[in-house]
Amino acid sequence: MSPEISVVIPVYNEAGNLRPLLRRLAAVLSRLGRPAEVLVVNDGSTDGTAVEIAAVAGEVAGLRELRLPSQSGQAHALWVGLQAAAGGYIVTLDGDGQDDPEDIPLLLAAVAKGEADLACGWRVDRQDTRLRRAMSALANAVRRGVLRDGLHDAGCQLRVFRRAVGGVMRPGTLMQTFLPALAVAAGFRVREYPVRHHARRHGASHYGLAQLWWRPAVALVAVAWRLRRERRARFARSGTGRGRRGATP
């Protein structure tokens, strides 16, 4: 039976967090009662991530590992997963256990009912350090001001969207962060919903200063340029005036 739901989880060195996450996810998917697949994209992990995936293969229906030969970055790993996904609804979340699979039904219902084409999680009570929260808030404010996507928390990877929305994403540094902005620009309906957030139990974040500031700044310029070019092309074809769409809070 073809899956209705494809869950895509890009991971890198998350051996300590992955097994409990996949078990919680399996319980949620079982309650939903819809055919589903779980695609774990192993981004060249050097720890026991592959062993942990294999250990729960019999407990998680539709579980598949997509193993990349070397680390390519979260955006590329996510893109690989999206290309392999067969479901009409796509679910994405991080593999560090901080996203809560129990929030998936909320986001899925929003998309299924037509409230949104892309339902994004909004971590209103983030369980991260004060410095990390402050840096993220500033980065979100800058991105929101430049791209006008209306999103409060573009860094939250807990999302549910229609398959067509994934088509706006291209491989590139931190493109997972800008998926909502690209979706808004393409005319899709994007909404945010408050979701839970847990402290990381094992390991450390893979995002340092370069990943939180320098690379996002470069990627933001690239995305802004791309969207500006695409808008000009649309206006040239249609001859219409300017318009702007944003995410609905």
Image (cartoon, rainbow, N blue to C red):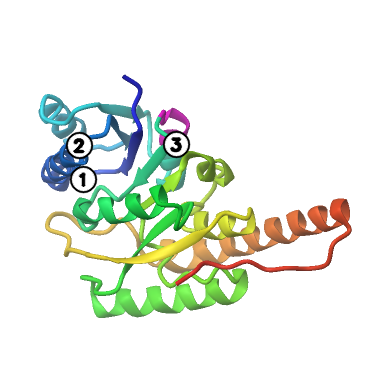
Residue beneath the point at 34% across and 49% down:
108
What residue type is disc 2 on?
Thr
Residue beneath the point at 41% across and 56% down:
119
- Residue 181 appearing in the image: yes
List the residue tagged with mark 2: 49
Residue situated in front as seen by the camera: 138 or 113: 113
Quick check: 219 above or below 54? Answer: below
Label 3 vs label 1, nearer the camera: 3
Element under disc 3: helix
Q: Residues within 10 Å of mark 2 (few under 14, many from 20)?
A: many
Residue 82 is tagged as 3
Quadrant housing residue 4: top left
Residue 14 is tagged as 1
| Chain part drawn in magenta | 80-86
What secondary structure is the stretch in magenta mostly built from? helix
Q: Are marks 1 and 2 in contact (CB under 8 Å)?
A: yes
Q: Where does residue 133 sit, x and y in percent of width and height?
A: 31, 76
Apparent side of residue 49 relative to residue 156 in the rendered image (left or right): left
